Amino acid sequence: MAQIGFKTDRGRRRDNNEDSLFVMPEQNIYIVADGVGGHNSGELASMTAVKNIAEYIVEHPVEKSNDAESIREYFQLCLKAVNQTIYQMAKNSKENAGMATTVVLLYLCDDQAYCMNVGDSRAYLVRDGRLRQITEDHTYVNELLKEGSITRAQAENHPQKNMITRALGGEEKILPDFYVIHSEKNDIFILCSDGLYGEVASEEICRLASKADSMSALSADLVNLANSNGGNDNITVVCLKI
């Protein structure tokens, strides 16, 4: 069982909220998406992603997949179908051309946590007072960082730090990353869009998580801190405590 909290906010600089979230406690599945695209296309892309993932899960129950490899295949098929839907929507409408969305998804089953991501929305694990980033950002700046072309300090202020290299709907084929984590009692998982970690340092996320009374309070505290630190983007968080 997990205790759950979640919150989304448009932030202080944006007119609309292009983030979406969806929680499915009965299925133990939690999703955050952050849309990109002009007009309201980003909003449409992220909403389509979470809605279609949820519908796929209801129509094809995940319980039938019971080992890491079959769970990976299950979610790959799910995201492949959703990717096609968004890709076709973008292709068929001039207004939605170029729209896409990040996605990060967490599935809890027995004492395992399965995580998938496309783009730069993240999953974190807080355990024993330490914060660990589970997912890896699919961004141009992260590529530069990995190959040693820039330092972490340069990455923080890089002019292209928001350029994502993978997104749902961005291309005809999609390759999500997949992670398996053995979960323990009192573990806290945090799913978020870049509007959170762009404003709030890892140490602060860890500090708030470690002293949180409830996951609802933690979600609200994280969003409030991101806003008070500037709120330059939409902010979305889903927090779970095992």
Image (cartoon, rainbow, N blue to C red):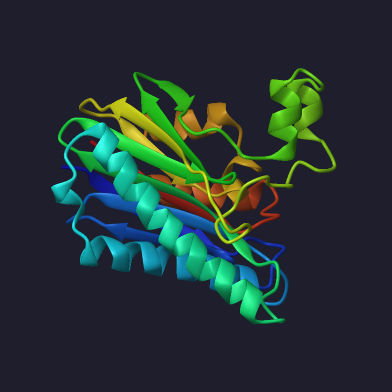
Outermost residue, right direction?
A: 159
Seen from the viewer's position, the closer of residues 170 and 101 is 170
Kindly identify the residue that appears in the image at 62 percent across and 47 percent down. 166
Quadrant including the C terminus = top left
Kindly identify the residue that appears in the image at 23 percent across and 45 percent down. 3
Asked if 41 appears above or below 113 in the picture, the reply is below
Give the percent coordinates (x, y) of residue 160. 81, 43
* Residue 212 in view here: no
Number of numbered discs visible in the structure rendering = 0
Give the percent coordinates (x, y) of residue 28. 23, 49
Asked if 201 appears above or below 149 in the picture, the reply is below
Kindly identify the residue that appears in the image at 38 percent across and 39 percent down. 115
Q: Is residue 39 left or right of residue 124?
A: right
Seen from the viewer's position, the closer of residues 90 and 215 is 90
Q: Is residue 18 left or right of residue 188?
A: right
Give the percent coordinates (x, y) of residue 184. 23, 25
Seen from the viewer's position, the closer of residues 54 and 159 is 54
Outermost residue, front direction?
A: 172
